Image (cartoon, rainbow, N blue to C red):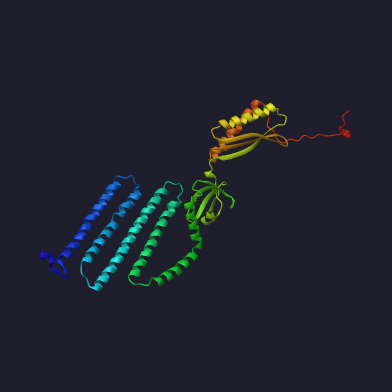
Amino acid sequence: MWFFKMDVLGNPLWKYVVFFGLLLAAAVLHPALRWFANRTLKFRAIPEEIEKSLRSLFGRPLGALLYLFALWAGVKLFTLPEAAGGIVRGLFITALTVVVIYIVTKLVDLLFSLWRERARRTETRLDDQVIPILSKVTKFFVWAIGILLVLQNLGYNVTSLLAGLGIGGLAVALAAQETLSNFIGALAILVDRPCEVGDRVDFDQLGIKGKIEAIGLRSTRVRTLDGTLVSIPNRTMANTLINNVAKRPTIKNEYTVGIVYDTPYEKVVEALKILRDILANHPSTANYRAYFKEFGPYSLNIVVTHWCKYTDYEQFLKATEEINLEIKRRFEEAGIAFAFPTQTVQLAGPLPGPFRQP
């Protein structure tokens, strides 16, 4: 049609129609895709925070990308002067870089939402504290790289800028060396998970034993067995040997039951049967051993090893008390006497005058 072939500012009218048609298509396509995404997410069992991040991704970031490509495709239809074309191309690359960075930050939010949802299933609060900081740091680096790309695209020399940032970053790193090392130590604890809040741990190299009360970004606080609160820098935590008592499947209790030397053979055998019967039938027993091991200085020694399935120390003590009381009761009923340190002194030869019998 001749109407669409009319020249307007050096370009036929149909190009303007196609240009606005592309913008209209983007305006229709974006709400349609957003509706489809929201409809799909509505019928999915997705955690609230992850669903929020996905809805946000299909919102402004997707809309900006669609409008930008529609605008670029429409502008490419027009015949522009070389100088104007260069300016438009630079503006498009700059805008595209910004939009892509914006989308990447939304993807970072989605990634950390998944991580945060996983962190909620753990008892430690360290990851709950670290994740927001890592999210902000990651997005900061993404935007920093994007800004450098934009500046380079606009013709600026970013080499000198990077050199200045490197010197400044080195100065900051040296000034905050201890803080950074503690933060890195916190990350190491988060990734490796040698212990969590509530765990009973032994730091043999530090001579500290107690329960983890809090794991922070700078230090870990331990409530020792005598009730004092000790703060251990995370860099020290990352480099020390951690014996996590709470993670052991059982508590091993080994002791010796001594009976007197004049106990008959039959009673020794009965003592072994009593011990094995008590250990085998107690609900706390995961495994056990009871053997007549040695002739001691003043007793016949039966070595007893009991693996208690109760890892809570209070429950372990109660189970041990029940077993010990039952051993004492059964031994008393059987007439088996416990030994205690004794010495027999035998004198040879005649007694001195005052002690000589008539």
Residue 246 in picture, x, y percent from top left? 53, 44
- Left or right of residue 218, residue 151 in this image: left
**Farthest residue, direction left:** 2
Q: In which quarter of the image is the C terminus?
A: top right
Is 189 located above or below residue 331 in the figure? below
Task: Judge from the rendering whether residue 271 lies leftward or rightward of residue 355; answer left or right.
Answer: left
In the displayed structure, would residue 142 be above or below residue 281? below
Q: Residue at x 42, y 54 (%)?
A: 131
Residue 215 in sight in this render: no
Residue drawn 36% across and 55% down? 109
Q: Position of residue 258 (x, y in %)?
A: 68, 34
Question: Observer-nearest residue: 210 or 188?
Answer: 188
Q: In this view, does 321 lie to the left or right of 24?
A: right
Residue occupying image coordinates x 51% and y 51%: 221
Quarter in which the N terminus is drawn: bottom left
Q: Quadrant of residue 292?
A: top right
Q: How many marks?
A: 0
- Considering depth in this image, is 115 or 210 the residue closer to the camera? 115
Answer yes or no: is residue 304 visible: yes
Q: Quadrant of residue 15?
A: bottom left
